[in-house]
């Protein structure tokens, strides 16, 4: 036994990771998310230009992704959260409901949980009352 099978591997912490069975509590920090439409061909990302896009004309469907800064309640730091349509629809639904009550998505926290693995992973987003204020001195990541 070499010990390599016992290593705990963690990322740099810049991006929010949502693992199955380990829900995360976040607070959205940006007024609105950045939206990117791109193609992934041979593990290479290219921006979709819309009408006239060569990849679209070749039949490759573009991926819609959003990115925003969030406050990770557990780690108590700012992280980048990149998400797809499944999570976006749930966040939008919560935002619409909050708007009916005179609130915004920035008035609450979100709990996001996942079930399943890889391409079969399913996400659930629920709203929660904010636990505590976000520190005034947080520095946001630049959205690209």
Image (cartoon, grey):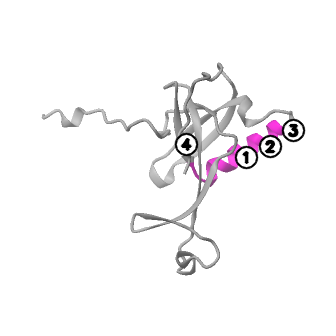
- Cα–Cα gap, marks 3 and 1: 13 Å
Residue of label 4: 81
Which residue bears the numbered disc 1?
92
User: Which quadrant is the N terminus positioned in?
Assistant: top left
Q: Residues within 10 Å of mark 3 (few under 14, many from 20)?
A: few
What's the CA distance linking mark 4 and mark 2? 20 Å
Q: Which mark is residue 100?
A: 3
Point 56% across, 70% down: residue: 61
Q: CA distance from mark 2 to mark 3?
A: 6 Å
Residue marked by disc 2: 96
Residue 7 in percent (x, y) is at 25, 33
Circles 3 and 1 in contact, beta carbons < 8 Å: no
x then y, percent, for residue 40: 47, 65
Q: CA distance from mark 3 to mark 4?
A: 26 Å
**N-term-proximal mark, 3 vs 4:** 4
Q: Residues within 10 Å of mark 1 (few under 14, many from 20)?
A: few
Percent position of residue 122, x then y: 56, 47
Q: In this rendering, is residue 14 above or below 133?
A: below
**Is 46 rendered above or below residue 142?**
below
Give the SS element for disc 1.
helix
Nearer the observer, disc 4 or disc 1? 4
* 61 magenta-colored: no
Which tag, 4 or 2, sits closer to the chain's start? 4
- Nearer to us of marks 4 and 2 is 4
Q: Residue at x 69, y 50 (%)?
A: 89
Asked if marks 2 and 3 touch (Cβ < 8 Å), the reply is yes
Residue at the spot x=49%, y=26% of the render? Answer: 75
**Quarter location, residue 41:** bottom left
Q: Position of residue 70 (x, y in %)?
A: 58, 35
User: Are dots 1 and 2 in contact, CB under 8 Å?
Assistant: yes
Image: magenta residue range? 83-99
């Amino acid at each position: 036994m070499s010990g390599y099978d016992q290593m705990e591997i963690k990322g740099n912490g810049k991006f929010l990771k949502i693992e199955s069975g380990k829900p995360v509590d976040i607070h959205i920090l940006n007024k609105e998310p950045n939206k990117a439409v791109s193609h992934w061909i041979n593990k290479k990302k290219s921006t979709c230009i819309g009408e006239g896009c060569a990849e679209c004309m070749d039949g490759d469907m573009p991926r819609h992704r959003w990115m925003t800064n969030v406050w990770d309640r557990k780690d108590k730091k700012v992280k980048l959260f990149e998400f797809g349509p499944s999570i976006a629809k749930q966040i939008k639904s919560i935002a619409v409901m909050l708007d009916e009550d005179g609130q915004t998505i920035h008035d609450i926290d979100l709990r996001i949980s996942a079930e399943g693995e890889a391409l079969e992973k399913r996400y659930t987003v629920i709203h929660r009352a904010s636990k505590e204020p976000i520190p005034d001195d947080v520095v946001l990541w630049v959205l690209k």
